[in-house]
Amino acid sequence: MENSNMVWDDVRVFLAVSRSGSLNAAAAALSLGIATVSRRIERLETALGQPLFLRHHTGYRLTDDGSELVARAEEMEAVARSLGAALPSAQEVSGTVRLATAENLATALILPALPRLRLAHPNLVLEVLTDIATVNLHRRDADIALRMVKPDRGNVSLQRLGTLGYGLYAAPAYLERRGAGPVDLDKDEVIAWADSHSHLPAAQWIERVLRGRAPAGLTTSLAAQVAACSAGVGLAVLPHLLATPRGLICLDADLGIDQGIWLVTQSDLLSSRRVKVVAEFLREVVAEARDTLER
C-alpha cells in the first residue's frame, strides 16, 4: 500500500477512529466535527485507493488494508510527536481574529460551535462582528468574513462554502386558523420587510407576490420576522437554518432566492496561523450544517 499521498491530518483521524471504533468518539477526542472526521477518512481512503474500515451499525472495524496501515500511521504519529516536542511553540495559536458575519449565521451556526474552537485553542480569541453594514474588510475592520454577498473588489481570497437556503414558512397556529388548502398569495397574510431593507432578496420576493396588497406586518430584522411568523401573524420568507429548529412549516422550498455562503479572507493574512485555524473552523461548521442550511 503506497503512502506517498497521505496527509498527517487524515492519518491522525484514521488512528483515532481505529482506536475508538467510532466517528463520534474520534471527533470528541480530536475536538473536530463528525462530518470532518468522516470526510478525512474518505479522503485518506481515496488517496490510498483502498477501503480502510468496514462500516457497521455498531461502529467502524478495520479492513485488512486498514490493519496493515496502523503500524505505518503510528510511525508517523511518533515523528509528529517528536517534532512537536522539539518545536512546542509551533502548535500554539494565540491572539485575536476579527470575524465579520451576519447575525443569523453568528447566532445559529458559529457561536453554538465556538466551545469546540476554544477547547482546541484556548489562547485564541474570536471577535464576532455582526454589524456587517458598517464592517469593511478593505478598511481592515475585520480579518476574515463569512457572508452571503460575494465581494467584487479588494485584495481578498474567496471560497464558497455552501448555500443559505430560504423557504416560505408558516406557524402551525396560522395554518390551523386559516384552514386547509394550498397557499394563496392573493389572500394569505404575509409578513414583509420595511422599506429600509427592500434590497434583500426575501423582501423583493415578497414585494413581487404581494403586488401592492398590504402585508400583515413589516419588520427590520430576521429575528423579528421569525418571531412574527412563530406567533402566527402570517407567512414569512425565512432561512431554513432559523425556521426549521423552531418548528415552522415549510410551504415552498423553491423560491429561487438561495444565497451562497462565502469565506472572505484578507489576502495578506492567508499565512497567519490563527486566521487559518479560524478559516478551517468555519469550513467545518458550514459543512456539518449543510443539510440544515440547504434543506
Image: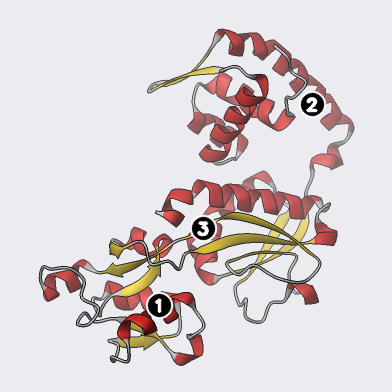
Residue 219 position in % (x across, y down): 40, 85
Kindly identify which numbered label has been placed on residue 60.
Answer: none
Residue 79 position in % (x across, y down): 82, 22
Q: Residue at x 46, y 91 (%)?
A: 195
Q: Nearer the viewer, residue 33 or 20?
A: 33
Vertical arrangement, residue 29 with respect to residue 257, above or below: above
Name the colouring of the figure: secondary structure
Q: Residue at x 52, y 18 (%)?
A: 53
Do we see residue 248 in this rendering? no
Amino acid under label 1?
Trp
Residue 194 position in % (x across, y down): 43, 89
User: Quick check: 292 left or right of 91?
Assistant: left
Amino acid under label 2?
Arg
Q: Residue at x 62, y 61 (%)?
A: 262
Q: Give the mark nearer the N terminus: 1 vs 2.
A: 2
Kindly identify which numbered label has been placed on residue 205.
Answer: 1
Q: Residue at x 82, y 53 (%)?
A: 272
Whole-number angstrom distance, CA of label 1 to CA of label 3: 18 Å
Give the position of the C terminus as an image quadrant. bottom left
**Disc 1, disc 3: CB below 8 Å?**
no
Vertical arrangement, residue 153 with respect to residue 294, above or below: below
Could you classify mark 2 by the number of other residues whose Cα lies within 10 Å: few (under 14), some (14-19), or many (20 or more)? few
- Foreground mark, 2 or 3? 3
Label 3 belongs to which residue?
163
Label 2 belongs to which residue?
81
Could you classify mark 3 by the number of other residues whose Cα lies within 10 Å: few (under 14), some (14-19), or many (20 or more)? some
Whole-number angstrom distance, CA of label 1 to CA of label 2: 55 Å
